[in-house]
Amino acid sequence: MPVRVEYPEIPSPCFVLEERLLRENLSLIQSIAKTTDVEIILAFKGFAMWSVFPIVREYVSGATASSLNEAMLCVEEMKSPAHTYAPVYDLETFSEIIKLSSHITFNSLSQYERFYPMIRESGKKVAVAIRINPEFSEVETDLYNPCAPGSRLGVIAAQLRDKLPEGVDGLHFHTLCESSSADLEKTLAAVEEKFGHLLKQAKWLNMGGGHLMTRKGYDTGHLIRLLQNFKAHYPNLHVILEPGSAFAWETGFLKATTLDVVENKGIQTAMLNVSFAAHMPDCLEMPYQPRIRHASSVPVPGKPLYRMGGNSCLSGDYYGSWSFDEELQVGDNLILEDMIHYTMVKTTFFNGVAHPSIGIIRQNGEFELIRKFGYEDYKAKLS
Ligand SMILES: Cc1ncc(COP(=O)(O)O)c(C=O)c1O
């Protein structure tokens, strides 16, 4: 039986973004922003493939940074100052963050007290916000729930006074993760209940990320109505959303290759040239089973069933079970779907495993290899 070859022009392993799909997401995001008069910016933490920022810039004009490095990338490659929110800032880098940012959000009142004077003394016009924690989130996985009891993220209502602190004219919350507009609606009710008086004083509100508006079935009409109603209620507020996943949702894949098939107590594992731990950590953290093209993630009786095994030596570097129409063979290519958001930004060189290349399928169908990684990249992360 011949081996299954997918996209022969694309090396393996490789993260492959499809420009057409990215543009579809960007158009939808742009039209929601225009219709609602809400600013929608890209959260780099979810997607920071800067070679396509010239395309992103055709549709949205800003980005949110969660570190000095992301703020630098924003100025350099998005050509705009960053909306910066980091859970914690440090003295060594904060002056630089001021220079690179149009907006800075503090996670706690103690951080505000320590660092706001530096903004004031810099003389630079920076919009300043406090991240609030409405103690309400529909996110069920604690790893992604910023409102779990004891959370270190954001200031709870009991800790804030009746007035916004000096120099603060914005509020920021982030409570959603791959969520619907109905989840946002419930969150807004909690935010209004706990922080309504401060919403009236503020000039801007950042509603964070997690708005998965590009997912099939997401009720964009409801989101639009919700945002319009909210803005009608608070005409004083400039509203910002900063999704990451929504930008790159289902815009590409990870091409991999089967290098071996091992068997233990009836379980067959396809050993791939990629690693869940190093290249798809969300699969293990969330956890979730990615889709594989031409395979069923629900076992089909009578069809060959495989676990996918990563190429690091971590015992748990494997996932799930997929049924294939035919037995997998050494050399078969596999296409792991929807592997663009929260993958490239999270990869590591754990075990020194080869890092997937990065490429783009252009709108005319042609593949362009953007980056290949080698020994020097691995070595440069160590010393
Ligand atoms: C503060 C903040 N903003 C935005 C985002 C982006 O969220 P998403 O990629 O789920 O849209 C995150 C994700 O963790 C976040 O923590």
Image: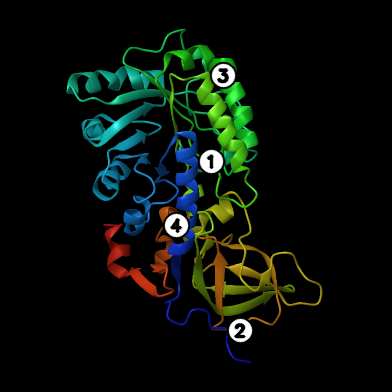
Task: Give the residue number, with chain letter if any, for mark 1.
Answer: 210
Indicate the colouring scheme. Answer: rainbow
The x, y position of residue 78, in whole percent, is 30, 48
Q: Quadrant of residue 284?
A: bottom right
Q: Nearer the viewer, residue 222 or 280?
A: 222
Q: Is residue 243 left or right of residue 267?
A: left
Reading the image, the residue beneath label 3 is 192
Residue closer to the observer: 378 or 183: 183
Q: Around disc 4, counting alpha carbons within 10 Å, would you say few (fewer than 14), some (14 to 19), or many (20 or more)?
A: some
Q: Nearer the viewer, residue 169 or 379?
A: 169
In this rendering, position of residue 370 left or right of residue 20: left
Left or right, 122 with reference to 144: left
Quarter of the rendering containing residue 318: bottom right
Q: Label 4 belongs to which residue?
A: 23
Image position, residue 239 (x, y; %): 45, 29
Q: Residue at x 69, y 65 (%)?
A: 297
- Callout 3: SS: helix
Q: Quadrant of the C terminus?
A: bottom left
Report which residue position mark 2 lands on.
Answer: 329
Q: Which of marks 3 and 1 precedes in the sequence?
A: 3
Distance from disc 4 to disc 3, alpha carbons, whole Å, reads 34 Å
**How far separated are the C-alphas under marks 4 and 2?**
36 Å
Which residue appears at 50% of the width and 25% of the height?
A: 231
Nearer mark to the viewer, of 4 and 2: 4
Q: Quadrant of residue 115?
A: top left
Q: Secondary structure at mark 4?
A: helix
Mark drawn on residue 354: none
